[in-house]
Image (cartoon, rainbow, N blue to C red):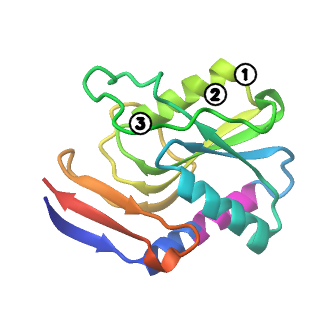
């Protein structure tokens, strides 16, 4: 695979700042706001958003991790290749507004699986979705409420997000040709 495009840490940082500002504007008065990382891709972005919302916007959030491994509809074709996080919700989902967080939105299947996992635990007041990169090519009618970057790709390309929460200057995104 060859790199078709690299998105610099400055662009990544600006995209994250944009997402944080949009979430803050929408949820300035929301109680019990939960940033729920879709494991494993959303974990780093959740850490960064949690810190930015607190420090830059004075918005307090709870962090959670959502394990989608048992709700994936392609598990037979794409077995789980790495260790996943167990679903952890610090708050009762019935009392929460949950923002699902993922690094890349592609077909919509991960978001659908995360919705299934959340609803297995309870029925939140509201669920939203944020993604750092929307690459298009949806096969399900799922869209992000908050999008950092829109990078159209072909179905055969791959988007690799390298997010380092405690050192964003080493973060970048590569779009790879197949």
Horizontal and vertical percent for residue 148?
50, 62
Is 14 within the magenta? Answer: no
Q: Is mark 2 in CB contact (under 8 Å) with mark 1?
A: yes
Q: CA distance from mark 2 to mark 3?
A: 16 Å
Q: Is residue 139 above or below residue 175?
A: above
Q: Residues within 10 Å of mark 3 (few under 14, many from 20)?
A: some
The residue at 21%/44% (across/down) is: 155
The residue tagged 2 is 118
Q: Which element type, helix, strand or loop, lies under badge 3? A: loop
State the residue position of label 3: 108
Q: Is residue 23 left or right of residue 95?
A: left
Q: Tag 2's secondary structure?
A: helix
Q: Residues within 10 Å of mark 1 (few under 14, many from 20)?
A: few
Mark toward the start of the polypeptide (1 vs 3): 3
Q: Which is in the foreground here, disc 2 or disc 3?
A: 2
User: Image quadrant of residue 152?
Assistant: bottom left
Tell me which residue sits at (48%, 42%) in the image: 143
For the residues labelled 2 and 1, the Cα–Cα distance comes to 6 Å
Instruction: Please tell me how many numbered marks the rendered image carries.
Output: 3
Q: Which residues are magenta?
A: 17-26
Marks 1 and 3: which is nearer the front? 1
Circle 1 residue: 122
- Using the numbered discs, state the Cα–Cα distance from disc 1 to disc 3 in whole angstroms: 21 Å
Check residue 21 for magenta coloring.
Answer: yes
Viewer-proximal residue among 139 and 45: 45
Could you say where residue 93 lies in the image, as x and y percent from the top left?
A: 76, 30
Where is residue 22? Give x, y as percent: 66, 62
Q: Residue at (36%, 44%) from the top-left corner?
A: 106
Please indicate whether residue 95 sits to the left or right of residue 99 in the image: right
Q: Which comes sooner in the sequence, label 2 or label 3?
A: 3
113 to 42, vertically: above or below: above
């Amino acid at each position: 695979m060859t790199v078709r495009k690299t998105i610099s840490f400055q662009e990544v940082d600006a995209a994250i700042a944009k997402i944080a500002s949009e979430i803050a504007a929408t949820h300035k008065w929301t109680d019990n706001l939960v940033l729920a990382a879709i494991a494993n891709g959303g974990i780093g972005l959740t850490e960064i958003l949690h810190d930015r919302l607190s420090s830059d916007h004075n918005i307090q959030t709870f962090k959670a991790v959502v394990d989608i491994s048992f709700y994936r509809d392609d598990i037979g074709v794409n077995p789980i290749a790495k260790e996943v996080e167990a679903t952890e919700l610090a708050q009762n989902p019935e009392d929460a507004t949950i923002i699902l967080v993922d690094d890349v939105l592609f077909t919509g299947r991960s978001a659908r699986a995360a919705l299934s996992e959340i609803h297995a635990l309870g029925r939140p007041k509201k669920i939203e979705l944020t993604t750092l990169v929307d690459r298009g090519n949806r096969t399900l009618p799922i869209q992000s409420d908050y999008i950092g970057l829109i990078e159209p790709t072909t179905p055969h390309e791959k988007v690799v997000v390298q997010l380092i929460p405690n050192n964003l200057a080493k973060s970048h995104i590569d779009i790879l040709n197949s």
